[in-house]
Image (cartoon, rainbow, N blue to C red):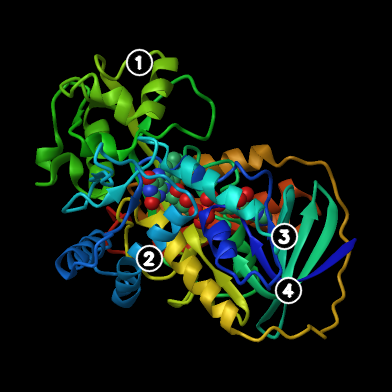
Amino acid sequence: MKQINTDIVIVGAGLAGIYTALNIDSSIRVDIIVKEDLHDTNSRLAQGGIAGELEIEPKNLEAHINDTLKAGSYLNDELAVRVLVNEASININRLMEYNVKFDRDINGKVLLTKEGGHSTRRILHSGGDSTGKDIMFALKEECMRRENIHIHENTMAIDLISDNNVCYGVSCLNGNKNTIHFIANNTVLATGGIGNIYGSTTNSTSATADGIALAYRKDVKIEKMEFVQFHPTAFHNQHSKHRQKFLISEAVRGEGAHLLNSESVRFMEKYDERLELAPRDKVSQAIYREMYDTWTDHVYLDARHLDPTFLPKRFPTIFNHLKQEGYDIRTQLIPVSPVQHFNVGGVKTDIYGQTTMKNLFANGECASNGVHGANRLASNSLLECIVFGNRIAININSAKITPITHQFSFKEVETYNYNYIPMKNKLGRLMDEYVGIVRTEDGLKLAKVQIIDMENSLIKDPNNSKHYYEALNMIQTAHLIVDAALKRTESIGCHYRIN
Ligand SMILES: Cc1cc2nc3c(=O)[nH]c(=O)nc-3n(C[C@H](O)[C@H](O)[C@H](O)COP(=O)(O)OP(=O)(O)OC[C@H]3O[C@@H](n4cnc5c(N)ncnc54)[C@H](O)[C@@H]3O)c2cc1C
């Protein structure tokens, strides 16, 4: 057992964690802990881009605010949305100072694209469709130059260290079973998404809902868990057994691609006047309906009418991936289906990232700061990571750091080499079947009974291993989703109940 005393511990090295760390004063020690390696993040997978108005033009800012509120079915916290939109410019400009190179035209003007739910072109991108990868590369380089930032890979947070609703850091597993306790004045949860709870997801393998479950086990408030966003267009590979599915960015539809059903008929006009650029919940629900009515498990993305020289240049990652899978997007229909993509709810915070536990902050996909309402507007999540990361840093920079005098006692638990894979697979099947795009009371209740059964068997038999904590985090978070989905009987945003 090892103990490290620090000023700030940040759990997670995606955009939410790294950007927060970069904005902390250089006189303050920051320890970032990462479950596996630095590459395994949802941030790195982001293709479409980052939304934000660079010019402070009130009419355009209001339009971004309105699009965000509309996509969220007005369940958003309007103050949080105003913060998100108004502070976009300063933080996106800071990304550029950190050497992120957004795509520009030959005159040096930043190129902007459009995605579902956006009324204008306001999305910056990099490398065509490798925005996340390029941002994370530049920020990692910047982190390496900072002497106050210490990164610990292969270190998984398993428990918050807390007393009387005050957070004092986090206990971790280094490798599979060696325990390290980080004692810190401030702790930031930035653990990302929940995707692996489902059988099919666009998320990275690290997205197992850890931060939400850690907070839940210490009675920190969690909210809006019924709102799980499904991306309409993941590449549908019938033969792939992997949970993680390849995403085909909404920006492809933003540039004019259409959706066709199994009869090669364009169908979105039956469902929404915004057609293929309706918000994701509407498009996913429409695809679900088409698949149901035609007894198939996919529809098609059609980009054959677009300029064939434009597609490989604008979407090199997507073009090359599909080529490897045997598809040419310039000449062939691409099979696609909706899969789990984004967690809208999470650990409740205020507009400074503060959770309901003192000295505990949350940022990024694991947090619920009110910006998304009942559904996230495309490309607002990278923005959320930087705007609220900056606010958390400002908050921490201005607070006085005092030595922690509290005494802690940590207990040892036995470790077994179980992998819990059958349990994780069973959970994925249950969530896909009963807690997916379309939900019913009977289905949710059926899932709940089995989830409680799995949860009880894990709690009865504790095991100090990475696999155990992942299974426990996934199952406890699934339980939170099912309970929230049962409670909300109306259909709104990405929560769709048919009875
Ligand atoms: C395929 C794909 C495409 C996307 N495209 C876009 C887009 O174009 N625009 C947009 O705005 N958004 C997009 N999103 C969403 C966006 O990428 C994410 O919401 C955002 O990057 C989340 O950042 P994060 O830092 O919160 O989480 P992540 O980037 O996932 O980082 C989480 C970090 O936490 C670590 N971690 C997790 N659990 C633990 C633990 N127990 N202990 C220690 N470390 C832990 C992980 O290892 C990782 O380092 C996309 C998402 C996906 C999956």
Q: What residue do we see at 34% from left, 46% from top?
A: 437
252 versus 88 height, above or below: above
Dot label at residue 327 = 1
* Residue type marked 1: Tyr
- Give how far apart the Cα atoms at labels 3 and 2 are: 35 Å
* Residue type marked 2: Ile
Sequence-first disc among 3 and 2: 2
Sequence-first disc among 4 and 1: 4
* Residue type marked 3: Ile
- Give how far apart the Cα atoms at labels 1 and 3 are: 42 Å
- Give how far apart the Cα atoms at labels 3 and 4 are: 15 Å
Closer to viewer: mark 4 or mark 1: 4
Quarter of the C terminus within the rendering? bottom left
Closer to viewer: mark 3 or mark 2: 2
Closer to viewer: mark 1 or mark 3: 1
Residue 119 shown left or right of residue 46 in the figure: left
| Position in image of residue 241 (x %, y %) | 53, 26
Give the structural element (helix, strand or loop) at label 4: strand
**Ligand 1 neighbours mark 3 (CB distance < 8 Å):** yes
Give the structural element (helix, strand or loop) at label 1: loop
